[in-house]
Amino acid sequence: MNSWDAGLAGLLVGTMGVSLLSNALVLLCLLHSADIRRQAPALFTLNLTCGNLLCTVVNMPLTLAGVVAQRQPAGDRLCRLAAFLDTFLAANSMLSMAALSIDRWVAVVFPLSYRAKMRLRDAALMVAYTWLHALAFPAAAVVLSWLGFHQLYASCTLCSRRPDERLRFAVFTGAFHALSFLLSFVVLCCTYFKVLKVARFHCRRIDVITMQTLVLLVDIHPSVRERCLEEQRRRRQRATKKISTFIGTFLVCFAPYVITRLVELSSAVPISSHWGVLSKCLAYSKAASDPFVYSLLRHQYRKSCKEILNRVLHRRSLRSSGLTRDSHSQNILPASE
């Protein structure tokens, strides 16, 4: 194994570790906080988190074994099952992000009727649709025998070894990425740009009120005025940064792999196996970044993490104090005898 392969293997191990810990922490927050569970986005987050964990414990280790061994890491049946999961989980992840963006759009554009428009039942129906949509392509691939080990990506995924099926497989692959990656990207852009438009409109209204207040308060201290103007600038940038993070992570993680899959269909452009595995690692890295982008950096999840940590530390302190008390009483008894 050369230095490139060792580096890619290290990247996969790091991605697996971060993904496993962060997604498990999101699940703990969901189990701990009833307030989070009562909200409709919790279903989308749960669906996304479970898919990320499944990808972490099944697909990533097999790809790691494929990188290290430079061959198919498991038997044909297990590899086909892993390829089915890989195709399903990739589409499910993208569509779950689109569902979360739709939820944010409804919450921002229709704040007064959000609870009526986005109930838990509505969220469950959207999750059910993402599952049906995501299952359609791997199910068709099973029937057409287009699942197996792909040497270019060192992973079990969509592949076709028969030259006479090249055109059909190219159409199938293009349709899959168009109805998963491209569709989700269009939904993300449309919803988040509308959210950004509403956020900027509210920022302008708040800026007008702030400037009018600063003009009226003639005796205000310059430092207070400067802090108000600084908060005004931060408010303008906050929504843009968040939306850029949502769309940017989606593109950075998924676009290289999707483009590589499409370019691979034309034999005119040779693709390095190192780039193929790297693009697959980037797609896997979305499972590690999702918990931070969509959950753990939010106030409710941070609060839940603190409560879980405090509870664990409190139990440890009680246990240690109980052991100290027992040892102290045992030391006193022999002395009294």
Image (cartoon, helix red, strand yellow):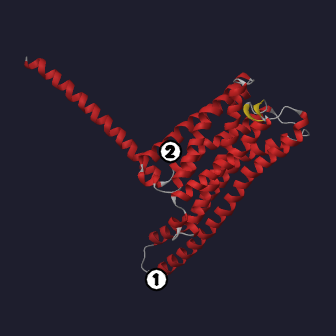
- Nearer to the camera, 110 or 81: 81
Q: Amino acid at mark 1?
A: Leu
Q: Is residue 152 left or right of residue 208?
A: right
Residue identifier under label 1 = 216
Residue drawn at 75 percent across, 31 percent down: 148
> In front of the other: label 2 or label 1?
2
Instruction: Name the image quarter holding the C terminus.
Output: top left
CA neighbours of label 2 inside 10 A, class few (<14), some (14 to 19), many (20+): many
**Of residues 317 and 178, the one drawn nearer to the viewer in this rendering:** 178
In the image, residue 222 lies at what x, y percent? Answer: 46, 72
Q: Is residue 336 left or right of residue 65?
A: left
**Nearest the camera: 129 or 257?**
129
- C-alpha distance separating marks 2 and 1: 47 Å
Q: Secondary structure at mark 1?
A: helix
- The vertical placement of 190 against 250, above or below, is below
Instruction: Name the residue furthest front.
Output: 143
Q: Is residue 176 left or right of residue 90?
A: right
Quarter residue 192 falls in: bottom right
The image quadrant of residue 277 is: top right
In the picture, the disc for residue 26 is 2
Q: Nearer the viewer, residue 102 or 304?
A: 102
Point out the tag, 2 or 1, that comes first from the N-terminus.
2
